[in-house]
Amino acid sequence: MPFYRFHLKPDQKLPHCMDEEVLLPNTEAALKEATRTCGEMIRDIDGLPLGCEWRMEVADEEGPIFAITVGAKQMRWASR
């Protein structure tokens, strides 16, 4: 089984860091683990500040495979 490296590139507004290697059977399992981890991180925060963006990058021995990007971007103010 190959090792997959999970690296979280944090935003200044969300300074959570992560850099670890995990032994997984394949890239599909790595994507599932990255998605689950990002989902847990989103669930555990108390709101995502506007303008915040962070990215989890996943690589194998040969280099980067994919990234999951999470952010909150203001498009316009909603009127009520």
Image: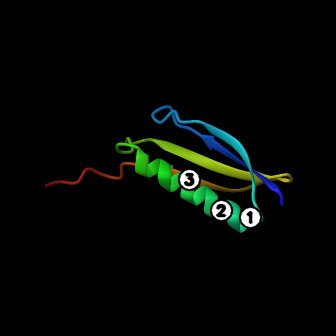
Task: Classify mark 3: helix, strand or loop.
Answer: helix
C-alpha span from label 3 to label 1: 15 Å
Residue 6 position within the rendered picture, expressed as x and y whole percent measured from the top left: 68, 48
* 70 vs 74, nearest the viewer: 70
Q: Are marks 3 and 1 in contact (CB under 8 Å)?
A: no
How packed mark 3 is, by other alpha carbons closer than 10 Å (few <14, some 14-19, many 20 or more), is some
Q: Is residue 12 above or below residue 3?
A: above
Q: Which mark is residue 27?
A: 1
Q: Which mark is residue 37?
A: 3
Q: Is residue 38 above or below residue 17?
A: below
How packed mark 1 is, by other alpha carbons closer than 10 Å (few <14, some 14-19, many 20 or more), is some
Residue lying furthest left: 80
How packed mark 2 is, by other alpha carbons closer than 10 Å (few <14, some 14-19, many 20 or more), is some
* 1 vs 58, nearest the viewer: 1
Amino acid type shown at disc 1: Thr
Residue 4 position within the rendered picture, expressed as x and y whole percent measured from the top left: 76, 53
Whichever of callouts 3 and 1 sits on the residue coming sooner in the sequence is 1
Amino acid type shown at disc 3: Thr
At a point 49% along the width and 56% down the height, the residue shown is 39
Whichever of callouts 2 and 3 sits on the residue coming sooner in the sequence is 2
Q: Are marks 1 and 2 in contact (CB under 8 Å)?
A: yes
Task: Classify mark 1: helix, strand or loop.
Answer: helix
Which part of the image, by quadrant, shows the C terminus?
bottom left
The residue tagged 2 is: 31
Amino acid type shown at disc 2: Leu
At a point 68% along the width and 40% down the height, the residue shown is 19
Instruction: Please indicate whether residue 24 sits to the left or right of residue 69 in the image.
Output: right
Instruction: Please indicate whether residue 7 sits to the left or right of residue 4 in the image.
Output: left
Residue lying furthest bottom: 28
Which part of the image, by quadrant, shows the N terminus?
bottom right
